[in-house]
Amino acid sequence: VTYQTNTFLDKNRDYVVVEHCNLLSSSKCPFVAGLFPVLSEESSRSSYKFSSVASRFKQQLQALMETLNSTEPHYIRCVKPNSLNRPQKFENPSILHQLRCGGVLEAVRISLAGYPTRRTYSDFVDRFGLLALEFMDESYEEKALTEKILRKLKLENFQLGRTKVFLRAGQIGILDSRRAEVLDSAARCIQHRWRTFIAHRNFVSIRAAAFVLQAQCRGCLARKLYGVKRETAAAISLQKYVRRWLSRHAFLKLSLAAIVIQSNIRGFSIRERFLHRKRHKAATVIQACWRMCKFRSAFQHHQTSIIAIQCRWRQKLAKRELRRLKQVANEAGALRLAKNKLERQLEDLTWRVQLEKKLRVSTEEAKSVEISKLQKLLESLNLELDAAKLATINECNKNAMLQNQLELSLKEKSALERELVAMAEIRKENAVLKSSLDSLEKKNSTLELELIKAQKENNNTIEKLREVEQKCSSLQQNMQSLEEKLSHLEDENHVLRQKALSVSPKSNRFGLPKAFSDKYTGSLSLPHVDRKPIFESPTPSKLITPFSHGLSESRRTKLTAERYQENLEFLSRCIKENLGFNNGKPVAACIIYKSLVHWQAFESERTAIFDYIIEGINDVLKVGDENSILPYWLSNASALLCLLQRSLRSNGLLTANTPRTTGSTGLPGRIAYGIKSPFKYIGFGDGIPHVEARYPAILFKQQLTACVEKIFGLIRDNLKKELSPLLGSCIQVPKTARVHAGKLSRSPGVQQQSHTSQWDNIIKFLDSLMRRLRENHVPSFFIRKLITQVFSFINISLFNSLLLRRECCTFSNGEYVKSGLAELEKWIVSAKEEFAGTSWHELNYIRQAVGFLVIHQKRKKSLDEIRQDLCPALTVRQIYRICTMYWDDKYGTQSVSNEVVAQMREILNKDNHNLSSNSFLLDDDLSIPFSTEDIDMAIPVTDPADTDIPAFLSEYPCAQFLVQHEK
C-alpha cells in the first residue's frame, strides 16, 4: 500500500492541550519552545477550544460542589428491586436481604429502641412554650421549663440531656397536636371578636342611616305644612291691602277738592294784604335814602382830609424803620440760611448712619445664622467622612484577611476562583467608597471657601462701619457748634421781633387801612415763632399735649430722658419676668404691642426702642433655662409677630423720602414719645387697627421674624441633642434581650420589658416635650412643625445607623426596631393630627428598611417586587447595602438571591458617574420649614384688648393707660 503524505496533518484532528503548549513554550530549550508556536488572536478566536477529560471532570466536580453547598443533602440508600431488571416489580426477599446486609434494618431497629426525636431546649421552649404559659415568667431555666411542660402533658417516654431533650417515636406528634389545639382555640376566639366587631359596626351604620331617613321625612312634612300656612297668610295680606287701596282712593278725591277751594280763598286775602304793605315800605325807603345822601356827603369830606394827614406821617416813620430793619434782616438772613442748610445736611447724615447700623446688624445676624448652618453642615459632613473612613478601614481589614486566605488556598483552584470573585466585589465597593470620599472632600473644601468669603465680607462691613462712625462723630461736633450759634441768633432775632412789634399801633379804627408793620411782620419774623413744641408729654390720653414755652432747655431734656428711661425699664421688666398667659393669650406680647401703639412708635421715623426689645429678648434667651424660656418666648414672639403682620401697613414711602419737621427733638425724645403726626387708620380688620408703618417698624417686623426662626432653631437643636443618646441605644437589641431571646421571642403572654425600656424613654421624652409646649401655649402650628422635625431626625438617625453598622442589620434587630416603631405610631395616634401632623410619613425610610429585614423567604423576592412593593422610597444603592450587610441571627436564613444582587450591582455600576447618588446615607434638613405668611395664616387672631394686666404695672406712670383701660 502506498501512502500519500499530502494533507496528512490537516486530516489528523487530534487537539493539543493548551496547558501542555504553555508548559513547553516556557522551556529554556529553543527547540522545545518552538514546537508549538503561539497562534494569532484571530486564529485562536476562530478555532474550536479543546476541552480535555480532566478539565471536563474538574468543571463537573466544581458544579457538583456548588450544588451541594447551596442545598441540604439527604443520604439515600439505593437497592435493586429485582434480578431481572424489570420495571414495577419488587422481590421482597432480595430487597430485605439487601437492607439487612446494608445495615439499614439494624439502624431502624436501633433508632426505634432509642430516642429518635432530638430537640435543643431553646427550640423546644420556643415551639411548645405556649402549652404551659404559667411557667414562662423567666424564673425557670430552659431545662427545667422543658421538664415542666412534659410533666404537665403527662408524657413519660423522654430523656433530658445536657443540651437537648430526647423523645421516643410518636411523642413529637402528640406535642404538635396539643399545640395545634391551643392555636385553634386562640384563632376561634379572635374570629369571634372580629365577627362581633363587624356586626356592631354594621348595626351602627344602619342605625345612623335610619336616623337620617327619619329626619328627612319629618323635614319634608314640616316643609309642606309651612307652605300651606304661608299661602294662607299671603292671601289674607293681599285682601287687606286691596281694601285699604280702595278706601284711600275715595278719601284722596274728597281731600283734593277741599284743598283747592281753601287755597283760592286764602290766596285772594293774602294778595290784598301784600299790596298794602308794599306801598308803605316804598315810602319809607325813599325818605331814608334822602337823609343818608345828605349825611354821607358831609362825612366823606371830613374823612379824606384826616386820612391824607395820617398817611403822610406814617409813611415817613415807616420808611425810616424800613431802612433800619433791612440792614438787620440782611445779616440775620444769611446766617439763618446757612444754619438751615447745615441742619438738613446733619439730619441726612445722621439718618444714613442709623440706616447703616441697622443694615449692618441685620447682615451680621444673617451671616451668623448662615455660618452656624454651614458649621452644622460641616460637622455632619465630617461625621459622614469619619463613617466612610471607618468603612474603608473595615474593608481594608477584610481585604488583608482575604489575601491571607488566598495565599493559603493557592493549591486548590476551585477555592481560588471563589476568592477572586469576592475580591472583585470588594474592590468595586472600595471604588464606590473612594468616590464618595472624594465627593465629601470636595463639599468640605467648597464649604470652607464659602466660610472664608463670608469672613472677608464681614471684615469689609466692619471697616465701613468704623469709617461711618468717625464721620458721625465729626458731624456731631459740627452740630454742637451750630447749635451754639443758633442759640445766639435766636436771642438776637427775639429782640428784633419785639422792637418790630412795638412800632405798629395798638389798634386801628374802623374803616382805616392796616399799618405797614402789620403787613410785613410775618415775612420778617424768624421760623422758630411758628414752630410746634419740641418735647411732648407721654400722658395716657390719645392727644399729646405740648410743654409750656416757659420751661428751660435743660429741664425739658432732663424730663424727656427720665421718661424715656422709665419706658425702657417698663419694657425690660415685661421681657425679663414671666407674665404668663391669660385665656391662652401671651400677656407679655399683648402689653408690648399695646404700649408701642399707645406711644405711636410704629409711625416714628427714627426710634431705638425696637432694637432694645430685640436685644432684651436675645439676652433672656442666653441667660434663662432653655427648656422653659424657649417655648415661652416662641409663643410670645409669634403672637407679637402676628399682631404686627395684621396691623402694620406700609405706605410705600420709606425713611429716605419721608419729610422731616424743622422742630424735631433729639433721638431720646423721638424714641420715648414718637412724632406728633396722628394715627392714620386705614381700616379695622379682626378687631386690630391697621397703621401706616414707617421703616423702623418694618425693620422691627423683619428682626422679630428672624428672632422667631432663631428660637425655633434653638428648640429643634436642643431636642436633637437630647434625642441622640436615646436613639443610639434604640437601634440595637440589648444583650440581655439576646440572651433570653429563646425564652421570650414567641411567648404571647409575657411582657418584654427589656425590649421596650429604651423606646419607653423616647415616648417619655416626647410626652415631656408635648407637655412643655402645651404649658406655654405654643400654637399648634409650631408644635406640628417641631414634632415633624423630631420624627424626621429619628428616621435619619436610625436609618443611617442601620446602614453603617452590620451588627444592627439582623433579623432580631429588625423585630426590635419594628416594635419600637409601633410604640411611636401609638403615640402619634394619641397626639392627634392637630399636633402630630404628618410625622408618621417622616418614618418611611426606616419603616420600609425594617419591614424588609423581618420578612421571610427573601430569596424568592425579585428586584421589582422589592423596589415597588417592599421598599418604594429606598434607592437601589440603599437596598443593595441592606442586602449585602443582612444576616439572620435567629433562624439562619439567607438574604436575596444572587441574581437580584447581580442586577443591583449592574445598576450601581451604570450610576457610578453620578456623584450625587453615590451616597446611601440620608442628610438632615437644617432649614426653617415655614415663612411669615404661613405663621399669619396658621395662627388664629389674638385680641390684645381682653388681656388682664399684672399688678406691678400700677407702679409705672407710663403704663397708667393700661390700668385705666382695664378699669
Image (tube, rainbow, N blue to C red):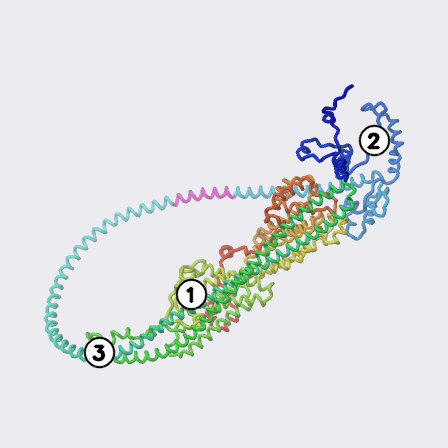
Which residue matches tag 1? 603
Horizontal and vertical percent position of residue 768: 63, 59
Vertical arrangement, residue 38 with respect to residue 825, above or below: above
Of mark 2 and mark 1, the one earlier in the sequence is: 2
Q: Is residue 777 visible?
A: no
Magenta-drawn stretch, dominant element (helix, strand or loop): helix
Q: Residue 318 sits in which quadrant?
A: bottom left
Give the alpha-carbon distance from disc 2 to disc 3, as whole Å.
Answer: 153 Å
Circle 2 SS class: loop
Three-letter amino acid code of the residue under disc 2: Cys
Residue range corresponding to the magenta coloring = 215-233
Which residue matches tag 3? 319
* Residue at (53, 41) in percent of width and height: 213
| Left or right position of 405 against 444 | right
Which residue matches tag 2? 78
Q: Is residue 735 visible?
A: yes
Three-letter amino acid code of the residue under disc 3: Lys
Whether the magenta-drawn stretch holds residue 708 is answered as no
Front residue of 207 and 929: 929
Horizontal and vertical percent position of residue 865: 64, 40
* Residue at (77, 52) in percent of width and height: 739
Of mark 1 and mark 3, the one earlier in the sequence is: 3
Horizontal and vertical percent position of residue 815: 70, 48
Q: Residues within 10 Å of mark 2 (few under 14, many from 20)?
A: few
Give the alpha-carbon distance from disc 2 to disc 1, as whole Å.
Answer: 106 Å
Mark toward the viewer: 2 or 1: 2
Circle 1 SS class: loop
Give the alpha-carbon distance from disc 1 to disc 3, as whole Å.
Answer: 50 Å
Circle 3 SS class: helix
